[in-house]
């Protein structure tokens, strides 16, 4: 369903997937119709290409050539910048995560992009809701990407209204030991790594590696299971020691993340 007000209202009133699909498609068409105001300033084609590329590139490092291999990077960059300013897309910046503030160690050329809303993501990827009888019929192949999209769009809402929200992640691209943490947040004077799992289970190899390398002692996993707290004490594949607290939370409790961090502490 996503979180766009009209989509939520329509679903509550009708419980109709077809009516929901109509709202999502109308919203996307409205955004694209709005692009005409930029005629003469930048390419409308590039704006549409970037908007439709973002759902396909969720969870991946955003590379301009992956949007349009024939376009100038500066043209794609300009189109992306406009969509970011319009809040249709949001940047997830890569950081080294050695201390606070997170923005002090941002790698400006490495970032991911999420869209404004998970319902629009599914529609733009071609999910034809009007063909389904109910939600239980839907077997989604990209649950992991959609889960990461959901967590990202909700993390933005945790900042006070007067603070420009920012999103960060950690990545290490090495042939022998690549690793990535989906999101990072600041909680007082510490950083909290966040791993996102669409289901109840899932390997945490990257998280174990991150926690063995960094000084932080608390991590969060959002998943489809119950609230629980586990003390992790093991060794990574490289022989490094893991010794940290893992707080596992269901997706619906994301808005309570800071309260729960204080409670578990």
Image (tube, helix red, strand yellow):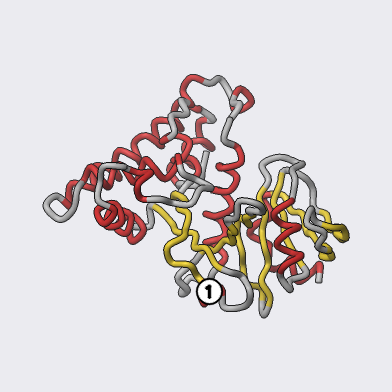
Q: Identify which residue, 177 or 215, lies in the foreground.
A: 177
Q: Identify which residue, 188 or 99, lies in the foreground.
A: 99
Q: Position of residue 177 (x, y in %)?
A: 66, 54
Q: Position of residue 55 (x, y in %)?
A: 45, 42
What residue is drawn where x is 74% and y is 53%?
249
Tell me the SS state at disc 1: helix
Is residue 111 placed above or below 7 in the rendered structure? below
Q: Position of residue 15 (x, y in %)?
A: 54, 30
Is residue 198 placed above or below 244 in the rendered structure? above
Is residue 126 placed above or below 73 in the rendered structure? above
Q: Is residue 188 left or right of residue 74?
A: right
Q: Is residue 200 left or right of residue 127?
A: right
What residue is drawn where x is 85% and y is 59%?
232
Residue 235: name its quadrant: bottom right
What residue is drawn where x is 84% and y is 63%?
241
Q: Is residue 179 left or right of residue 26?
A: right
What residue is drawn where x is 81% and y is 71%?
265
What residue is pinned by disc 1? 105
Q: Identify which residue, 144 or 119, lies in the foreground.
A: 144
Residue count near mark 1 (Cα–Cα under 10 Å), binned few <14, some 14–19, many ≥20: some
Q: Going by the picture, which residue comes out furthest to the front?
A: 176
Q: Looking at the image, how many numbered discs can be counted on the residues?
A: 1
Q: Identify which residue, 197 or 122, lies in the foreground.
A: 197
Q: Is residue 202 left or right of residue 97?
A: right
Q: Position of residue 81 (x, y in %)?
A: 32, 59
């Amino acid at each position: 369903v996503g979180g766009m007000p009209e989509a939520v209202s329509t679903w509550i009133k009708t419980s109709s997937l077809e009516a929901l699909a109509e709202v999502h498609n109308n919203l996307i068409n409205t955004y694209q119709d709005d692009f005409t105001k930029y005629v003469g300033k930048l390419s409308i084609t590039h704006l549409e290409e970037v908007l439709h590329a973002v759902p396909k590139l969720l969870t991946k490092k955003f590379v301009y050539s992956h949007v349009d291999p024939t376009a100038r990077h500066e043209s794609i960059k300009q189109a992306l910048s406009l969509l970011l300013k319009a809040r249709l897309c949001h940047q997830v910046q890569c950081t080294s995560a050695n201390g606070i503030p997170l923005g002090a160690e941002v790698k400006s050329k490495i970032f991911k992009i999420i869209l404004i809303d998970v319902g629009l993501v599914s529609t733009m990827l071609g999910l034809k809701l009007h063909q389904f009888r109910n939600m239980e019929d839907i077997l989604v192949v990209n649950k992991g990407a959609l889960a990461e999209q959901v967590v990202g769009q909700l993390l933005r809402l945790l900042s006070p209204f007067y603070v420009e929200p920012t999103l960060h992640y950690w990545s290490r691209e090495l042939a022998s030991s690549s690793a990535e943490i989906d999101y990072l947040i600041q909680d007082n004077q510490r950083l909290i790594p966040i791993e996102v799992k669409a289901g109840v289970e899932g390997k945490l190899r990257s998280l174990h590696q991150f926690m063995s390398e960094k000084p932080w002692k608390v991590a969060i996993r959002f998943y489809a299971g119950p609230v629980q707290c586990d003390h992790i004490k093991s060794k990574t594949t490289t022989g490094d020691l893991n010794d940290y607290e893992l707080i596992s939370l269901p997706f619906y409790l994301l808005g309570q993340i800071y309260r729960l961090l204080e409670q578990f502490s």
